[in-house]
Amino acid sequence: MSFVTFVAATLIATIPATDSLTPITIRLQAMVADAPFQCGRSYSGIGTTGASITASDFRFYVHNVRLVNARGDTVRAALAPLAPWQDRDVALVDFENGTATCANGTPETHPEITVLAPAGEYRGVAFTMGVPFARNHGDLASQAPPLSLSRLFWSWNAGYKFLRVDMRATQGDSAATAWVIHLGSTGCTGAPGAKAPTSCSHGNRPEIALSGFDPARDVIVADLAALLSRSDVRKNQPQTAMGCMAAPNDADCGGLFASLGLAHPNATGADTPKFFRVGRGALTGASR
Amino acid sequence: MPVLFGVTGAGAAGAALGAIGAQPPAPSAAARPTARTVPPNGYRWQLPPGFPEPVVPADNPMSDAKVALGRHLFYDTRLSGNGTFSCASCHLQSRAFADALPRAVGSTGEVHPRGSMGLANVAYSPALTWANPLMRSLEQQALVPMFGEDPVELGLSGREQELLQRVRAEPRYAALFAAAYPGGGDPVSLDHIVKALASFQRTMISGRSPYDVFKQGKTSAISASARRGEELFFSEKTECFHCHGGFNFTGTVNYVGKGFVEMEFHNTALYNVDGQGAYPATNTGVESITHDPEDMGKFKAPSLRNVAVTAPYMHDGSIATLEEVIEHYNAGGRTVKSGPHAGVGAESPLKSEFIKPMELTPQEKRDLVAFLRSLTDSTFLRDPRFTNPWRSTR
């Protein structure tokens, strides 16, 4: 935390506000319904059966950030190079702190995105979840952060996990079942001589737009309860990955994809609660 | 007359390769390679007679120091999360760097849906693993067993810093890394580890089997039965060579001067669980990567070199012996009589056009097996260059 604060302070001090671009911090907050997210904590009432979950990972990548100004114009908000969390192409949002059930994660957290945008007042935000195609299929072993995390390698699919949420679910006295969300591009192909895929039939990069968001006041809430609201986390479709690893033939992905605004053969209805929402003002009691 | 070896190798290498198969086609002017046996950086391959030079990524040139480092890493259990497994746990030299299990078992006991692949001549493969057209280099592939989580193999996901610390703590690595990656700074990195592993694997070249000796002119090197088996293998009656052709007995092959990279995946009618050609849902081959229905059940034809020591067979280890493999192909597809995978493979609409009933006689089946057994390179299976380097000093 102190390291990140130091880096951010250094960044703000060293990035000249030329062309009236100024660093703006977009804050995020991981929640499970009304409760702040914590590794190791059990949350009840999840999904279609009201199960309990304990998460062991919660991270995602974003890029292509935009802000909506007071006049209603969408302006590009360039990612500020802020190692190790973001470079000019992609940023990592990290809610897990490497403790308790998240022991395989990293101690550092990063619930924010820092962008360079014209100074002024804003009332909306938009971004794309995931790693841009041009950066998604490089040599994983030699990438600089934030693309250097092996937990987010999706090696067999030649890319990254854009969103990773791992959890165990229980209900009543039943034994815990593993349920994971690994979202990334699938259906990728490339010419025989090519070193990397040249296209993917399922990019799986959610487009997120939130109105009524003032970065000076509000936070973007990423709500696991909303993400899982149409899922039965106690069950796994037989002969598919546990939970959802983004396969088009895995019905367990349907509710998640709908919550993220992605197409899927099993997508639930338009009334599916959305993973992201605007949190008005500073949330209290939240461990950010 | 079928083209048995689609080889347009370099200069003398091409001529010698011609001796292994039938007549190689004349290289076109565009594809004609520049003959060279010593790469610019001076690395000397120890290639069997007639073998072409493997393709090496530009950012990972071969060196003896990198190969030595990679050999130590390959046999090092520090490369697993719980310190119990190394690459060699599932890739045994005595089995041509495959293992004896139907399906591999990882460091945490998780069973892989597929079997460990042999690594002999992996340097010539432009597509790694059983059925992943995206897996183009050994450097890229090494990350799958190390960091993969579905299934867990070596179990290093999220533990790359711990891995680097363990490696730095081993005194022997200081000199090995410094020699492999001169130039100052800390040479211990994930990138350098996978590059060294890839370099070592590229030296695992096998081409000194009795069959190779036979093709170099010593007729008595293999039995009369194996010679008849060779004729059958390269005949339209069996069509084996269509998928297992070339000096490495696989269609998926590349080398310096080849001119074209070839990657092939085939549905060999092992399953037909829905009458439409479906394979079991957890093991659909290339389809699981591309989501293309045409790719259902397509897997890479592995090299047949040393095949006699890599039982059991097929991607899921579902056939125990070479004799039973021949029966499967002789029937033009496998019939699974009962259970969740029941179905008549021979009736699969997706099976390769070369999978058809062969009507082999018992003697012909024995001849084919004798031929396959003549591909065992016993020098490779005990070559001291590939043994465990930790064992001699500990």
Image: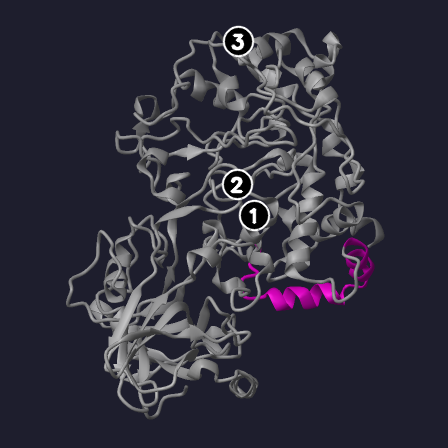
Residue at (69% x, 24% y) in the render: B10
Please name the residue that numbered disc 2 is placed on: B129
Q: What numbered label is drawn on residue B341?
A: none
Q: Secondary structure at mark 2?
A: loop
Residue range in magenta is: B154-180
Quadrant assignment, res A174: bottom left
> Which tag, 3 or 1, sits closer to the chain's start?
1
Residue at (50% x, 9% y) in the render: B362
User: Which subunit holds the residue at mark 2?
Assistant: B
Please name the residue that numbered disc 1 is placed on: B141
The secondary structure making up most of the magenta span is helix
Nearer to us: label 3 or label 2: 2
Residue B179 highlighted magenta (yes or no): yes
CA–CA distance in space, label 3 to label 1: 38 Å
User: Which subunit holds the residue at mark 1?
Assistant: B
Q: Nearer the viewer, residue B120 or B344?
A: B120
Q: What numbered label is drawn on residue B364?
A: 3
Q: Amino acid at mark 1?
A: Gln
User: Which subunit holds the residue at mark 3?
Assistant: B
> With B392 as the anchor, is A272 left or right in this view?
left
> Looking at the image, can residue B186 be seen?
yes
Neighbour tally class for label 3: few under 14, some 14-19, many 20 plus, Cα within 10 Å: some
Q: Secondary structure at mark 1?
A: helix
Badges 3 and 1, same chain = yes
Neighbour tally class for label 1: few under 14, some 14-19, many 20 plus, Cα within 10 Å: many
Q: Do the CB atoms of the residues marked 1 and 2 lie less than 8 Å apart?
A: yes
